[in-house]
């Protein structure tokens, strides 16, 4: 009996150690994920429908903090520009410095440097813009359009400004990576821009951040549950002591 007790005690001590390690590792992942996310991302509430249907008014998004030099065509960015009202706005980068952007070709599409661009993220069918336009983007600047082309106040409205509707790269503070609420998933990079110089940007670490938080929470719950479960199963396996039988005199 003493040998069995030692084995059970050994298994109990090992289980306690493992559960403690699980809780400790879970805390590191859980808290580390939140800290990592706070460093990399800023939450932002989209104020208007100008980017619908990609993001709607009131959507809560995760925007990765980046510098303007990291921006690529197709990115949905948060920027602030005095000419545009000196408040944070969300638009899609369609052309960058040196590009000639025109709309619309015979099929109603935007073209960049003579290359027609398919834009599956647009709500409207038909022409990519209700009004025709053409502009050459100055170096170091970005040409921005909303995905809701019928009502978006974007670079098309500012074509007569000195920058021909473009804003400096330095005006960009973040790039949208995901819609957090209501849950909408990751922001896809439009592959139509892949063939142009510079290609498209790579997604930020939002998957890793969320994965670390979720895995950390699971490890904490599993480690914390070990003790009560072990005690419950131990009680079920412990045999009831047999009653003594009185000897006849």
Image (tube, rainbow, N blue to C red):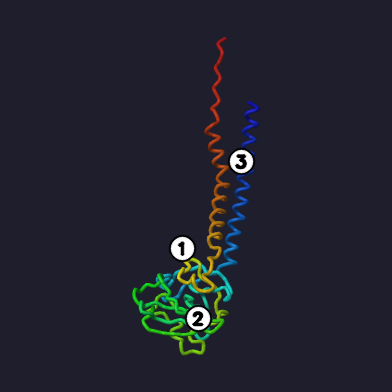
Residue pushed farthest top?
A: 249
Compare marks 2 and 1 and give the one earlier in the sequence.
Answer: 2
Name the spot of residue 149 as percent of width and height, x first. Answer: 39, 78
Name the spot of residue 187 as percent of width and height, x first. Answer: 47, 66
Seen from the viewer's position, the closer of residues 63 and 147 is: 147
Q: Relative to residue 44, is residue 31 depicted above or below?
A: above
Residue pushed farthest front?
A: 114
Quadrant where the image shows the C terminus: top right
Q: Residues within 10 Å of mark 1 (few under 14, many from 20)?
A: few
Q: Quadrant of residue 106?
A: bottom left
The kind of secondary structure element at disc 1 is: strand
> For the point 54% across and 41% down, which residue is it?
229
Please name which of the two marks, 2 or 3, marks the residue nearer to the observer.
2
Compare marks 2 and 3 and give the one earlier in the sequence.
Answer: 3
The residue where tag 1 is placed is 185
- Residue 143 visible in the displayed image: yes
């Amino acid at each position: 009996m003493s040998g069995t007790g030692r084995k059970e005690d050994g298994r109990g001590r090992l289980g306690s150690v493992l559960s403690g390690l699980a809780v400790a590792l879970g805390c590191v992942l859980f808290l580390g994920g939140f800290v990592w996310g706070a460093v990399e991302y800023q939450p932002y509430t989209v104020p208007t429908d100008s980017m619908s249907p990609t993001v709607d008014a009131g959507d809560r998004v995760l925007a990765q903090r980046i510098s303007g030099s990291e921006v690529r065509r197709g990115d949905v960015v948060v920027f602030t520009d005095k000419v545009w009202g000196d408040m944070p706005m969300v638009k899609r980068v369609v052309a960058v410095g040196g590009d000639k952007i025109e709309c619309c070709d015979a099929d109603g599409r935007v073209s960049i440097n003579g290359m027609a661009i398919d834009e599956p993220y647009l709500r409207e069918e038909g022409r990519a813009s209700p009004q025709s336009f053409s502009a050459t983007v100055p170096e170091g600047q970005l040409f921005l359009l909303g995905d809701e082309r019928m009502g978006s106040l974007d670079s098309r409205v500012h074509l007569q400004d000195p920058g021909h509707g473009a804003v400096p790269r330095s005006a960009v503070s973040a790039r949208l990576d995901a819609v957090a609420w209501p849950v909408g998933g990751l922001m896809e990079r439009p592959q139509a821009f892949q063939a142009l110089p510079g290609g498209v940007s790579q997604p930020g670490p939002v998957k890793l951040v969320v994965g670390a938080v979720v895995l950390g929470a699971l490890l904490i719950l599993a480690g914390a549950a070990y003790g009560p479960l072990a005690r419950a199963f131990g009680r079920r396996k412990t045999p009831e002591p047999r009653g003594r039988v009185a000897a006849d005199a």
